[in-house]
Amino acid sequence: MNHPALGMIEFKSIAKGIFATDAILKKAPIELLSTNPVCPGKYIVIFGGDVASVDESLKAGLEAGSDLVINSLFIPNL
């Protein structure tokens, strides 16, 4: 489980989080590390892979989540 980059997105909606997770996984070859509701109505997705793939998947997730994204994190070159 060696990932040069990590991405994380937090959503205000569980349904939108699941929808965005689908977009994240279909965009680039990344590994889904964690995806679950964290409290009522909030959802977090954490994924890893090479820097370019995580960056592209993060952009896809932010686009799919649109206005229901609370926060995002991208850590390249771990």
Image: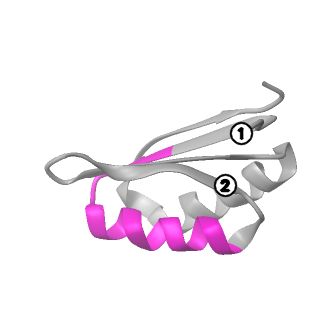
Q: Which residues are magenta?
A: 9-26
Q: Quadrant of the C terminus?
A: top right
As for residue 10 lying within the magenta part, the answer is: yes
**Which disc number belongs to residue 75?**
none
Mark 1 and mark 2 in contact (Cβ < 8 Å)?
yes
At x 30%, y 70%, the residue is 15
At x 49%, y 46%, the residue is 9
Q: Which residue is mark 1?
A: 1
The spot of residue 45 in percent (x, y) is 47, 50
Between 68 and 35, the one lying in front of the other is 35
Q: Quadrant of the N terminus?
A: top right
Between 42 and 70, the one lying in front of the other is 42
Going from N to C along the chain, the mark reached first, 2 or 1, is 1
At x 36%, y 68%, the residue is 16
The spot of residue 46 in percent (x, y) is 53, 45
Can you tell which of label 2 and label 1 is closer to the viewer?
A: 1
The spot of residue 30 in percent (x, y) is 72, 57
Q: Which residue is mark 2?
A: 31
Of the residues shown, which amino acid type is indicated by label 2? Glu
